[in-house]
Protein backbone atom coordinates (compact mmCIF):
# COMPACT_ATOMS: atom_id res chain seq x y z
CA UNK A 1 0.00 0.00 0.00
CA UNK A 2 1.35 3.43 -0.88
CA UNK A 3 1.02 5.99 1.87
CA UNK A 4 1.35 9.66 1.16
CA UNK A 5 2.10 12.26 3.73
CA UNK A 6 -0.55 14.88 4.30
CA UNK A 7 -1.02 17.31 7.15
CA UNK A 8 -4.44 16.85 8.68
CA UNK A 9 -3.94 19.82 10.92
CA UNK A 10 -2.23 23.15 10.89
CA UNK A 11 -0.32 22.56 14.11
CA UNK A 12 3.40 22.83 14.40
CA UNK A 13 5.56 19.77 14.42
CA UNK A 14 8.84 19.15 16.07
CA UNK A 15 11.81 17.33 14.75
CA UNK A 16 12.11 14.27 16.97
CA UNK A 17 12.62 12.37 20.20
CA UNK A 18 15.82 10.64 21.35
CA UNK A 19 16.41 7.84 23.83
CA UNK A 20 19.50 6.03 25.04
CA UNK A 21 20.22 3.37 27.68
CA UNK A 22 23.27 1.60 29.11
CA UNK A 23 22.49 -1.44 31.27
CA UNK A 24 25.55 -2.17 33.45
CA UNK A 25 24.22 -5.63 34.33
CA UNK A 26 24.40 -6.70 30.69
CA UNK A 27 20.65 -7.06 30.06
CA UNK A 28 19.33 -6.58 26.52
CA UNK A 29 17.89 -3.09 26.05
CA UNK A 30 16.10 -3.12 22.65
CA UNK A 31 12.61 -3.63 24.08
CA UNK A 32 13.18 -0.92 26.70
CA UNK A 33 14.23 1.52 23.95
CA UNK A 34 11.08 0.56 22.02
CA UNK A 35 8.83 1.47 24.94
CA UNK A 36 10.82 4.65 25.53
CA UNK A 37 10.26 5.66 21.91
CA UNK A 38 6.59 4.78 22.24
CA UNK A 39 6.36 7.38 25.02
CA UNK A 40 8.09 9.91 22.72
CA UNK A 41 5.97 9.06 19.64
CA UNK A 42 4.24 12.48 19.83
CA UNK A 43 7.60 14.11 18.95
CA UNK A 44 7.78 12.43 15.55
CA UNK A 45 5.73 9.95 13.55
CA UNK A 46 7.53 9.74 10.20
CA UNK A 47 10.23 7.23 11.01
CA UNK A 48 11.92 5.53 13.93
CA UNK A 49 14.88 3.33 14.66
CA UNK A 50 16.95 1.51 17.26
CA UNK A 51 20.66 0.63 17.32
CA UNK A 52 22.20 -1.60 20.01
CA UNK A 53 25.61 -3.00 20.89
CA UNK A 54 27.09 -5.37 23.47
CA UNK A 55 29.70 -3.66 25.65
CA UNK A 56 31.36 -6.99 26.39
CA UNK A 57 31.21 -8.21 22.78
CA UNK A 58 33.15 -7.34 19.61
CA UNK A 59 33.77 -3.58 19.46
CA UNK A 60 32.56 -2.93 15.92
CA UNK A 61 29.29 -4.86 16.06
CA UNK A 62 26.15 -2.69 16.05
CA UNK A 63 22.71 -4.15 15.34
CA UNK A 64 20.18 -1.66 14.03
CA UNK A 65 16.67 -1.59 12.62
CA UNK A 66 14.78 1.43 11.33
CA UNK A 67 11.97 2.29 8.97
CA UNK A 68 9.18 4.65 7.98
CA UNK A 69 6.11 4.89 10.20
CA UNK A 70 5.13 4.56 13.85
CA UNK A 71 7.01 2.39 16.35
CA UNK A 72 4.41 -0.38 16.24
CA UNK A 73 4.55 -0.37 12.42
CA UNK A 74 8.34 -0.52 12.17
CA UNK A 75 9.19 -3.09 14.87
CA UNK A 76 7.95 -6.64 15.38
CA UNK A 77 8.58 -8.69 18.56
CA UNK A 78 11.00 -10.76 16.45
CA UNK A 79 12.97 -7.64 15.45
CA UNK A 80 13.40 -6.64 19.09
CA UNK A 81 14.23 -10.19 20.19
CA UNK A 82 17.03 -10.45 17.63
CA UNK A 83 18.68 -7.19 18.71
CA UNK A 84 21.03 -8.38 21.45
CA UNK A 85 22.95 -5.70 23.33
CA UNK A 86 23.08 -3.87 26.66
CA UNK A 87 23.74 -0.38 25.28
CA UNK A 88 21.65 1.36 22.65
CA UNK A 89 20.06 4.47 21.21
CA UNK A 90 16.65 5.09 19.66
CA UNK A 91 15.02 7.85 17.66
CA UNK A 92 11.60 8.89 16.45
CA UNK A 93 11.55 11.49 13.68
CA UNK A 94 9.57 14.25 12.08
CA UNK A 95 11.55 16.07 9.42
CA UNK A 96 12.00 19.83 9.39
CA UNK A 97 15.17 19.70 7.26
CA UNK A 98 15.91 16.78 4.96
CA UNK A 99 13.32 14.80 3.06
CA UNK A 100 11.07 12.14 4.52
CA UNK A 101 12.85 8.97 3.38
CA UNK A 102 14.14 5.80 4.99
CA UNK A 103 17.74 6.93 4.38
CA UNK A 104 17.09 9.88 6.69
CA UNK A 105 15.71 7.73 9.52
CA UNK A 106 17.86 7.58 12.64
CA UNK A 107 19.87 6.50 14.60
CA UNK A 108 22.80 6.91 12.23
CA UNK A 109 25.47 4.21 12.59
CA UNK A 110 29.00 5.10 11.50
CA UNK A 111 32.00 2.81 11.12
CA UNK A 112 35.23 4.80 11.23
CA UNK A 113 38.90 4.43 12.11
CA UNK A 114 38.28 4.45 15.87
CA UNK A 115 35.37 2.00 15.84
CA UNK A 116 31.64 2.65 15.63
CA UNK A 117 29.25 5.45 16.58
CA UNK A 118 25.46 5.34 16.90
CA UNK A 119 23.90 8.80 16.96
CA UNK A 120 20.38 10.18 17.49
CA UNK A 121 19.74 13.92 17.20
CA UNK A 122 16.87 16.24 18.07
CA UNK A 123 17.08 19.78 16.71
CA UNK A 124 18.29 21.73 13.71
CA UNK A 125 21.70 23.16 12.84
CA UNK A 126 21.86 26.57 11.19
CA UNK A 127 25.33 26.23 9.65
CA UNK A 128 24.71 22.92 7.85
CA UNK A 129 25.46 24.19 4.29
CA UNK A 130 28.88 25.58 5.29
CA UNK A 131 29.85 22.45 7.24
CA UNK A 132 28.62 20.18 4.45
CA UNK A 133 30.74 22.04 1.88
CA UNK A 134 33.77 21.91 4.17
CA UNK A 135 33.37 18.13 4.64
CA UNK A 136 32.65 17.51 0.93
CA UNK A 137 35.84 19.35 -0.06
CA UNK A 138 37.85 16.86 2.01
CA UNK A 139 36.20 13.85 0.44
CA UNK A 140 33.17 13.13 2.62
CA UNK A 141 30.44 11.09 0.93
CA UNK A 142 26.94 11.67 2.28
CA UNK A 143 24.30 8.97 2.62
CA UNK A 144 21.51 11.26 3.87
CA UNK A 145 20.20 14.82 3.50
CA UNK A 146 20.00 15.51 7.24
CA UNK A 147 22.18 17.67 9.46
CA UNK A 148 22.53 14.80 11.95
CA UNK A 149 24.97 13.16 9.53
CA UNK A 150 27.09 16.33 9.63
CA UNK A 151 27.25 16.05 13.44
CA UNK A 152 28.25 12.38 13.21
CA UNK A 153 31.05 13.25 10.75
CA UNK A 154 32.29 16.12 12.92
CA UNK A 155 32.48 13.83 15.95
CA UNK A 156 34.21 11.04 13.98
CA UNK A 157 36.78 13.47 12.54
CA UNK A 158 37.49 15.06 15.90
CA UNK A 159 37.90 11.62 17.48
CA UNK A 160 40.97 10.93 15.32
CA UNK A 161 42.82 13.72 17.19
CA UNK A 162 41.02 13.55 20.56
CA UNK A 163 41.74 11.01 23.33
CA UNK A 164 38.07 10.11 24.00
CA UNK A 165 34.66 10.16 22.31
CA UNK A 166 33.37 12.72 24.82
CA UNK A 167 36.31 15.02 23.99
CA UNK A 168 35.46 14.59 20.31
CA UNK A 169 31.83 15.57 21.02
CA UNK A 170 33.08 18.72 22.80
CA UNK A 171 35.32 19.52 19.83
CA UNK A 172 32.43 19.05 17.38
CA UNK A 173 30.21 21.30 19.54
CA UNK A 174 32.66 24.16 18.94
CA UNK A 175 31.85 24.03 15.23
CA UNK A 176 28.16 23.15 15.01
CA UNK A 177 25.65 25.96 15.56
CA UNK A 178 21.96 25.71 16.31
CA UNK A 179 19.67 23.43 18.27
CA UNK A 180 20.69 19.92 19.25
CA UNK A 181 20.16 17.33 21.92
CA UNK A 182 22.34 14.34 21.11
CA UNK A 183 22.54 10.77 22.31
CA UNK A 184 25.71 9.02 21.14
CA UNK A 185 26.60 5.36 21.59
CA UNK A 186 30.22 4.25 21.35
CA UNK A 187 31.29 0.62 22.00
CA UNK A 188 31.72 1.20 25.76
CA UNK A 189 30.03 4.54 26.51
CA UNK A 190 26.71 6.37 26.26
CA UNK A 191 27.03 10.12 25.80
CA UNK A 192 24.40 12.85 25.98
CA UNK A 193 24.95 16.45 24.87
CA UNK A 194 22.74 19.52 24.75
CA UNK A 195 23.44 22.71 22.83
CA UNK A 196 24.60 25.69 24.93
CA UNK A 197 21.27 27.51 24.54
CA UNK A 198 19.22 24.50 25.66
CA UNK A 199 16.73 24.72 22.76
CA UNK A 200 15.73 21.06 23.05
CA UNK A 201 15.26 19.06 26.25
CA UNK A 202 17.31 16.08 27.48
CA UNK A 203 17.17 14.35 30.86
CA UNK A 204 18.88 11.54 32.76
CA UNK A 205 17.13 8.60 34.42
CA UNK A 206 18.10 5.46 36.33
CA UNK A 207 16.48 2.06 36.64
CA UNK A 208 18.33 -0.45 38.79
CA UNK A 209 21.83 -0.59 37.35
CA UNK A 210 20.90 1.05 34.05
CA UNK A 211 21.24 4.72 33.09
CA UNK A 212 18.91 6.36 30.59
CA UNK A 213 18.96 9.53 28.46
CA UNK A 214 15.63 10.75 27.05
CA UNK A 215 14.04 13.80 25.45
CA UNK A 216 11.29 13.92 28.07
CA UNK A 217 10.84 12.65 31.61
CA UNK A 218 7.57 10.90 30.64
CA UNK A 219 9.68 8.31 28.75
CA UNK A 220 11.39 7.47 32.06
CA UNK A 221 7.99 6.99 33.74
CA UNK A 222 6.91 4.62 30.96
CA UNK A 223 9.84 2.24 31.52
CA UNK A 224 9.71 2.48 35.33
CA UNK A 225 12.89 4.54 35.70
CA UNK A 226 13.44 7.33 38.21
CA UNK A 227 14.26 10.85 37.08
CA UNK A 228 17.80 11.83 38.10
CA UNK A 229 18.19 15.31 36.59
CA UNK A 230 18.14 17.33 33.37
CA UNK A 231 21.23 17.58 31.22
CA UNK A 232 22.15 21.27 31.49
CA UNK A 233 22.33 23.47 28.38
CA UNK A 234 25.86 23.08 26.99
CA UNK A 235 26.64 20.04 29.14
CA UNK A 236 28.10 16.74 27.91
CA UNK A 237 27.42 13.70 30.11
CA UNK A 238 29.31 10.44 29.69
CA UNK A 239 27.90 7.22 31.14
CA UNK A 240 30.35 4.35 31.70
CA UNK A 241 30.74 1.47 34.15
CA UNK A 242 32.17 4.06 36.57
CA UNK A 243 28.97 6.15 36.52
CA UNK A 244 28.23 9.64 35.13
CA UNK A 245 30.96 12.08 34.21
CA UNK A 246 30.10 15.69 33.32
CA UNK A 247 31.83 18.21 31.04
CA UNK A 248 30.50 21.76 31.31
CA UNK A 249 33.17 23.48 29.20
CA UNK A 250 30.59 24.45 26.56
CA UNK A 251 28.08 25.95 29.03
CA UNK A 252 27.18 29.64 28.70
CA UNK A 253 25.64 32.05 31.27
CA UNK A 254 22.02 31.24 32.18
CA UNK A 255 20.93 34.66 30.94
CA UNK A 256 21.73 33.51 27.39
CA UNK A 257 19.70 30.28 27.56
CA UNK A 258 16.97 30.03 24.93
CA UNK A 259 14.72 27.00 25.42
CA UNK A 260 12.06 26.58 22.76
CA UNK A 261 8.91 27.89 24.45
CA UNK A 262 6.86 25.52 22.28
CA UNK A 263 8.09 22.59 24.33
CA UNK A 264 5.86 24.03 27.08
CA UNK A 265 3.04 25.25 24.82
CA UNK A 266 2.68 22.24 22.55
CA UNK A 267 5.48 19.76 21.82
CA UNK A 268 6.05 18.00 25.12
CA UNK A 269 3.56 15.66 26.71
CA UNK A 270 1.60 17.34 29.54
CA UNK A 271 3.03 14.84 32.07
CA UNK A 272 6.63 15.87 31.28
CA UNK A 273 8.87 18.14 33.33
CA UNK A 274 11.43 20.15 31.38
CA UNK A 275 14.25 21.80 33.32
CA UNK A 276 12.20 21.48 36.48
CA UNK A 277 9.06 23.08 35.04
CA UNK A 278 5.80 21.12 34.72
CA UNK A 279 4.43 21.28 31.17
CA UNK A 280 0.92 20.75 32.55
CA UNK A 281 1.27 23.74 34.88
CA UNK A 282 2.68 25.90 32.07
CA UNK A 283 -0.41 25.24 29.96
CA UNK A 284 -2.74 25.97 32.86
CA UNK A 285 -0.92 29.30 33.34
CA UNK A 286 -1.40 30.11 29.62
CA UNK A 287 -5.14 29.39 29.86
CA UNK A 288 -5.53 31.45 33.03
CA UNK A 289 -3.68 34.36 31.42
CA UNK A 290 -5.97 34.24 28.37
CA UNK A 291 -9.02 34.40 30.65
CA UNK A 292 -7.59 37.35 32.63
CA UNK A 293 -6.48 39.43 29.68
CA UNK A 294 -8.99 38.36 27.00
CA UNK A 295 -12.29 37.52 28.74
CA UNK A 296 -15.56 36.96 26.92
CA UNK A 297 -19.08 36.01 28.04
CA UNK A 298 -19.80 32.42 27.05
CA UNK A 299 -21.42 29.17 28.18
CA UNK A 300 -18.64 26.66 27.55
CA UNK A 301 -14.83 26.47 27.26
CA UNK A 302 -13.44 23.71 25.02
CA UNK A 303 -9.96 22.73 23.89
CA UNK A 304 -8.88 21.53 20.45
CA UNK A 305 -7.36 18.12 21.26
CA UNK A 306 -4.88 17.36 22.57
CA UNK A 307 -2.70 20.40 23.09
CA UNK A 308 -5.54 22.87 23.67
CA UNK A 309 -7.17 20.85 26.45
CA UNK A 310 -5.04 21.87 29.45
CA UNK A 311 -5.03 25.56 28.46
CA UNK A 312 -8.84 25.32 28.12
CA UNK A 313 -9.00 23.95 31.68
CA UNK A 314 -6.92 26.92 32.86
CA UNK A 315 -9.27 29.34 31.09
CA UNK A 316 -12.29 27.67 32.68
CA UNK A 317 -10.72 27.75 36.17
CA UNK A 318 -9.93 31.45 35.90
CA UNK A 319 -13.19 32.54 34.24
CA UNK A 320 -15.61 30.30 36.08
CA UNK A 321 -17.13 29.25 32.74
CA UNK A 322 -17.67 25.45 32.61
CA UNK A 323 -15.03 23.37 30.84
CA UNK A 324 -16.42 20.78 28.43
CA UNK A 325 -15.57 18.39 25.68
CA UNK A 326 -16.68 19.41 22.19
CA UNK A 327 -14.45 17.24 20.00
CA UNK A 328 -13.99 13.53 19.57
CA UNK A 329 -10.55 12.76 18.20
CA UNK A 330 -9.72 9.74 16.08
CA UNK A 331 -6.51 8.57 17.73
CA UNK A 332 -5.67 6.15 14.94
CA UNK A 333 -4.77 8.75 12.34
CA UNK A 334 -0.99 8.80 12.02
CA UNK A 335 0.93 11.31 9.97
CA UNK A 336 1.18 8.94 7.00
CA UNK A 337 -2.14 8.02 5.51
CA UNK A 338 -3.77 8.02 2.11
CA UNK A 339 -4.36 11.59 1.05
CA UNK A 340 -7.93 12.68 0.28
CA UNK A 341 -8.51 13.95 -3.24
CA UNK A 342 -8.31 17.72 -3.75
CA UNK A 343 -12.09 17.84 -4.26
CA UNK A 344 -12.73 16.43 -0.77
CA UNK A 345 -9.81 17.99 1.06
CA UNK A 346 -12.06 19.62 3.65
CA UNK A 347 -12.85 16.11 4.90
CA UNK A 348 -9.26 15.75 6.15
CA UNK A 349 -10.09 17.66 9.33
CA UNK A 350 -13.17 15.50 9.88
CA UNK A 351 -11.03 12.37 9.56
CA UNK A 352 -9.27 13.49 12.72
CA UNK A 353 -11.93 15.47 14.63
CA UNK A 354 -15.69 15.35 15.00
CA UNK A 355 -17.90 17.68 17.01
CA UNK A 356 -20.24 16.53 19.80
CA UNK A 357 -23.43 18.27 18.70
CA UNK A 358 -25.16 17.88 22.06
CA UNK A 359 -22.28 19.61 23.85
CA UNK A 360 -22.28 22.81 21.76
CA UNK A 361 -25.80 23.21 20.32
CA UNK A 362 -27.27 26.61 21.19
CA UNK A 363 -24.19 27.61 23.23
CA UNK A 364 -21.65 30.40 23.13
CA UNK A 365 -18.37 28.50 22.89
CA UNK A 366 -14.81 29.57 23.71
CA UNK A 367 -12.44 27.38 21.69
CA UNK A 368 -8.83 27.19 22.91
CA UNK A 369 -6.04 26.09 20.56
CA UNK A 370 -2.27 26.25 20.91
CA UNK A 371 -1.48 28.15 17.70
CA UNK A 372 -2.63 29.31 14.29
CA UNK A 373 0.09 28.82 11.69
CA UNK A 374 -1.31 29.11 8.15
CA UNK A 375 -4.93 29.26 9.27
CA UNK A 376 -5.88 26.43 6.92
CA UNK A 377 -7.77 24.38 9.49
CA UNK A 378 -8.91 26.91 12.10
CA UNK A 379 -11.68 28.10 9.80
CA UNK A 380 -12.84 24.51 9.27
CA UNK A 381 -12.93 23.75 12.99
CA UNK A 382 -14.86 26.97 13.68
CA UNK A 383 -17.20 26.04 10.83
CA UNK A 384 -17.75 22.56 12.29
CA UNK A 385 -18.76 24.08 15.65
CA UNK A 386 -21.24 26.39 13.90
CA UNK A 387 -22.68 23.51 11.86
CA UNK A 388 -23.21 21.63 15.11
CA UNK A 389 -25.33 24.53 16.36
CA UNK A 390 -22.91 26.70 18.36
CA UNK A 391 -24.45 30.18 18.71
CA UNK A 392 -21.09 31.97 18.98
CA UNK A 393 -17.50 30.79 18.60
CA UNK A 394 -14.76 32.77 20.34
CA UNK A 395 -11.21 31.61 19.59
CA UNK A 396 -8.38 32.00 22.11
CA UNK A 397 -4.82 30.96 21.24
CA UNK A 398 -2.37 29.91 23.95
CA UNK A 399 0.62 31.43 22.14
CA UNK A 400 1.35 34.84 20.59
CA UNK A 401 0.93 35.26 16.80
CA UNK A 402 3.64 33.73 14.59
CA UNK A 403 5.33 36.51 12.66
CA UNK A 404 8.69 34.93 11.78
CA UNK A 405 10.05 31.51 10.73
CA UNK A 406 11.95 29.14 13.05
CA UNK A 407 15.45 27.88 12.27
CA UNK A 408 15.91 25.65 15.30
CA UNK A 409 13.89 22.51 14.65
CA UNK A 410 10.27 23.66 14.51
CA UNK A 411 8.47 23.67 11.17
CA UNK A 412 7.27 27.28 11.28
CA UNK A 413 7.32 28.22 7.58
CA UNK A 414 8.46 31.36 5.80
CA UNK A 415 6.73 34.63 6.66
CA UNK A 416 4.59 34.72 3.53
CA UNK A 417 2.87 31.49 4.64
CA UNK A 418 2.07 32.73 8.15
CA UNK A 419 -1.49 34.00 8.49
CA UNK A 420 -0.48 36.59 11.11
CA UNK A 421 2.20 38.12 8.90
CA UNK A 422 0.96 41.53 7.67
CA UNK A 423 -2.57 40.89 9.03
CA UNK A 424 -4.31 42.32 12.06
CA UNK A 425 -6.03 40.11 14.65
CA UNK A 426 -9.39 41.37 13.37
CA UNK A 427 -8.49 40.35 9.81
CA UNK A 428 -7.47 36.87 10.96
CA UNK A 429 -10.69 36.61 12.98
CA UNK A 430 -12.71 37.27 9.80
CA UNK A 431 -10.68 34.73 7.78
CA UNK A 432 -11.29 31.93 10.30
CA UNK A 433 -14.93 32.93 10.77
CA UNK A 434 -14.85 33.44 14.56
CA UNK A 435 -16.91 35.92 16.59
CA UNK A 436 -13.77 37.06 18.37
CA UNK A 437 -10.07 36.12 18.46
CA UNK A 438 -7.29 36.80 20.95
CA UNK A 439 -3.75 35.54 21.41
CA UNK A 440 -1.62 35.02 24.50
CA UNK A 441 0.39 38.10 25.49
CA UNK A 442 4.13 37.66 25.00
CA UNK A 443 4.90 38.66 28.61
CA UNK A 444 3.07 35.55 29.83
CA UNK A 445 5.64 33.28 28.19
CA UNK A 446 8.17 34.03 30.94
CA UNK A 447 5.60 33.16 33.59
CA UNK A 448 4.98 29.86 31.79
CA UNK A 449 8.70 29.00 31.84
CA UNK A 450 9.05 30.10 35.49
CA UNK A 451 11.64 32.68 34.46
CA UNK A 452 13.91 30.25 32.57
CA UNK A 453 15.59 31.64 29.45
CA UNK A 454 13.44 31.01 26.35
CA UNK A 455 13.56 31.63 22.60
CA UNK A 456 10.79 33.92 21.31
CA UNK A 457 12.20 34.48 17.81
CA UNK A 458 9.11 33.18 15.98
CA UNK A 459 7.01 35.85 17.72
CA UNK A 460 9.29 38.90 17.70
CA UNK A 461 12.21 38.14 15.35
CA UNK A 462 14.75 38.32 18.21
CA UNK A 463 16.72 35.11 17.74
CA UNK A 464 19.39 33.97 20.23
CA UNK A 465 21.69 33.19 17.26
CA UNK A 466 21.92 35.07 13.98
CA UNK A 467 19.62 33.24 11.56
CA UNK A 468 21.19 31.60 8.49
CA UNK A 469 21.67 33.71 5.39
CA UNK A 470 20.72 30.85 3.06
CA UNK A 471 17.90 28.31 3.04
CA UNK A 472 18.80 25.44 5.38
CA UNK A 473 15.72 23.38 4.54
CA UNK A 474 15.71 20.89 1.75
CA UNK A 475 18.79 22.21 -0.11
CA UNK A 476 19.92 18.64 -0.61
CA UNK A 477 16.60 17.12 -1.58
CA UNK A 478 16.96 18.11 -5.25
Image: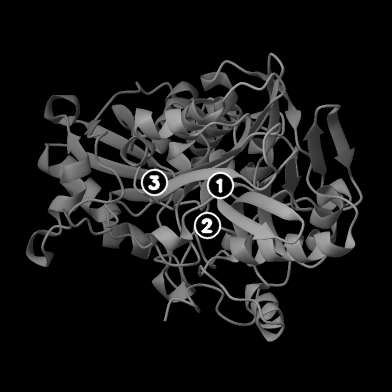
Location of the C terminus by quadrant is bottom left
What is the distance, in whole Å, between disc 1 and disc 2 at their CAs? 9 Å
Judging depth in this view, the residue of 450 and 332 nearest the camera is 332
The residue located at (12%, 30%) in the rendering is: 357
Could you say which disc has been placed on residue 262 in the image? Answer: 1
Write down the quadrant of residue 338 in the picture. Answer: bottom left
For mark 2, does the 10 Å Cα neighbourhood hold few (<14), some (14 to 19), or many (20 or more) residues?
A: many
Quadrant of residue 171 in the image?
A: bottom right
Q: Position of residue 465 (x, y in %)?
A: 73, 66
Earlier residue among tags 1 and 2: 1
Quick one: 165 or 329, which is closer to the camera? Answer: 165
User: Can residue 433 be seen from the camera position used here?
Assistant: no
Between discs 1 and 3, the one toward the N terminus = 3
Residue 46: x percent and y percent?
38, 51
Which SS class for mark 2? loop
Residue at (67% x, 54% y) in the render: 180
Secondary structure at numbered mark 3: loop
**Residue wearing tag 3:** 45
Residue 237, visible in the rendered structure: yes
Q: Nearer the viewer, mark 3 or mark 2?
A: 3
Q: Secondary structure at mark 1?
A: helix
Q: Residue at x 45, y 32 (%)?
A: 82
Q: Is residue 179 positioned above or below 241 on the image?
A: below
In space, the residues marked 3 and 2 are separated at their CA atoms by 14 Å
**Image mark for residue 410:** 2
Mark 1 touching mark 2, by CB under 8 A? yes
Of the two numbered discs 3 and 2 on the same chain, state the one appearing first in sequence.
3
* The quadrant where residue 431 appears: bottom left
Please say if 7 is above or below 56: below
Amino acid sequence: MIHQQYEVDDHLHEECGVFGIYDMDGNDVASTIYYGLFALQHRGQESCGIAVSDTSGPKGLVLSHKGMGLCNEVFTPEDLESMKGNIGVGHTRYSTAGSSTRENAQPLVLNYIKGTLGLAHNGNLINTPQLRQELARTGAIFQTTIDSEIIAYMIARARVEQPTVQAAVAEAMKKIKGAYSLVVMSPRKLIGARDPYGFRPLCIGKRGNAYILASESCALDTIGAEFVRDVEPGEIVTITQKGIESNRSMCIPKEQHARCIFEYIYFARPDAYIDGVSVYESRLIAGRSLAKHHPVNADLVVGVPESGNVAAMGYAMESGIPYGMAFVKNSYVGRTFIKPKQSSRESSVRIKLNVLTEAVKGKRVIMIDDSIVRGTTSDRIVGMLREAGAKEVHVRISSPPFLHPCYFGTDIPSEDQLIAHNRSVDEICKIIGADSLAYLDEECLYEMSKGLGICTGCFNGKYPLDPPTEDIRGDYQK
